[in-house]
Amino acid sequence: MMVTNLWGSRTHAIAQSVVVGFYPVMLANRELVDASQDWLDANPEANPALRRVVSENRDGVARALAAQQRDAQRMKA
């Protein structure tokens, strides 16, 4: 995986900045949450700090989707 190679070949600060910066948060949808979880499931041996960054990004998208759903429900009421 490119991201695991990147993580292993850069300093923590640089690798984290790249992973966070390139995470496609603007594409916030269920598929992104699922793809992030699939990566986590497929890469249990990945660096724990990298897994944390991916998990935090996934969780941020999941929260955004939940908020959007809640807003949509309120608009209907």
Image (cartoon, rainbow, N blue to C red):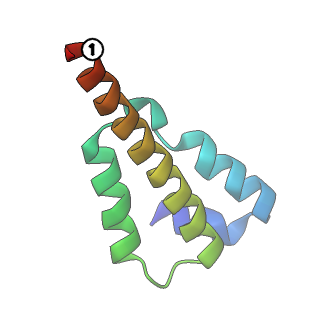
Q: Is residue 58 left or right of residue 10?
A: left
For label 1, the SS is: helix
| Residue 48 higher or lower than 71, as above or below | below
34 is higher (above) or lower (below) than 67: below
Query: Closer to the camera, 52 or 63?
Result: 63
Q: Residue furthest bottom?
A: 45
**Residue placed most toward the observer, 27 or 19:** 27
Q: Which residue does the image show at 51% across and 44% down from the upper left?
A: 23
Q: Quarter of the image holding residue 38?
A: bottom left
Q: Quadrant of the C terminus?
A: top left
The correct choice, above or below, for 57 with respect to 2 in the image is above
User: Residue 63: horizontal and vertical position, in percent?
Assistant: 44, 43
**Residue found at x 61% / y 47%:** 20
| Residue 36 place in picture, x, y as percent | 38, 57
Q: Where residue 65 appears, x then y in whole percent? A: 35, 37
Q: Quickly name the residue at label 1.
A: 75
Determine crowd level at label 1: few under 14, some 14-19, many 20+ residues with C-alpha closer than 10 A: few
